[in-house]
Image: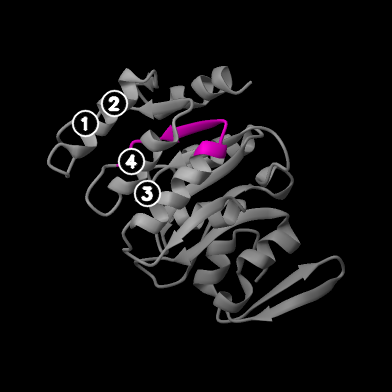
Amino acid sequence: GVFHELELAARDSDRLAVVARGGVPIAGAPEEVLTAATLRGVFAGRAVIGTDPVTGGVAVTPVLREQVAVAEDGPEIRVIGGSGASARIQRELAGAGFRVHAGALSAGDIDFAVAEALGAGVVALPAFGEVDATAEREVASVARAATVVLVSGVPFGRANLGNLRAVREAGGPVVLVGDMSPGRDFTGGEAAALWDDLVRSGATVVAEEAEAVEAIRRLAP
């Protein structure tokens, strides 16, 4: 069979052969062929490669075209995310020409996978890891160097509260998405107190993610 839909090819084939530039640069089992490196080299695109939870096959989620995936200059935006909360905004910011740093994220988190696909900076934590004092200092250092810090709609618990403390410590322009409702604060009120400190210090608050890019454009034209 000849396929242009990669997940369909992976699901229905025992072996795949990539045909490109008049040759077959790679062939093998779907998980050997459909890698991030292949997507970049053959299709000039960045993608998150994972496993379909139902079929167990290779799952391919395109992120951005290679030529716009990594900005070499332009303002750097530090993004606080996790649990998929910042996956879309990372992609949008990179596509808009900003340099993205994804901050402290655990291996296996979807936001971590998107950051890797984009070539964004990240403070890497082990799977289900906590933002400890060392990671918090590194996040604060990155945030101080950033043009704008964006706090996405991620919930906060003990494991990631250090990210929010680091933002307050760093100072500088901050964009906050949403509000710190009880359904988002699992720290007994510490996250809400840090959030309120940021608002009092002049942070820009937007109701939803769709408004965040424009807010960042105003702060970092």
Toward the viewer: 12 or 110?
Answer: 110
Query: Are circles 1 and 2 on residues that touch, CB within 8 Å?
Result: yes
Name the residue nearer the viewer: 49 or 77: 77
Which residue has dot 4 on it? 165
50 displayed left or right of 159: right
Which color scheme is applied?
A: one colour
- The stretch of residues the image draws in magenta is 144-154
Which residue position holds label 1? 193
Q: Residues within 10 Å of mark 4 (few under 14, many from 20)?
A: some
Q: CA distance from mark 4 to mark 3?
A: 15 Å
In this image, 188 relative to 71: left or right? left
**Mark 1 or mark 3: which is in front?**
1
Q: Is residue 153 one of those drawn in magenta?
A: yes
**Mark 2 lies on residue:** 197
Residue placed at 61% from the left, 81% from the top?
15
Marks 1 and 3, how far apart at CA: 20 Å
- Asked whether the viewer can see residue 152, the reply is no
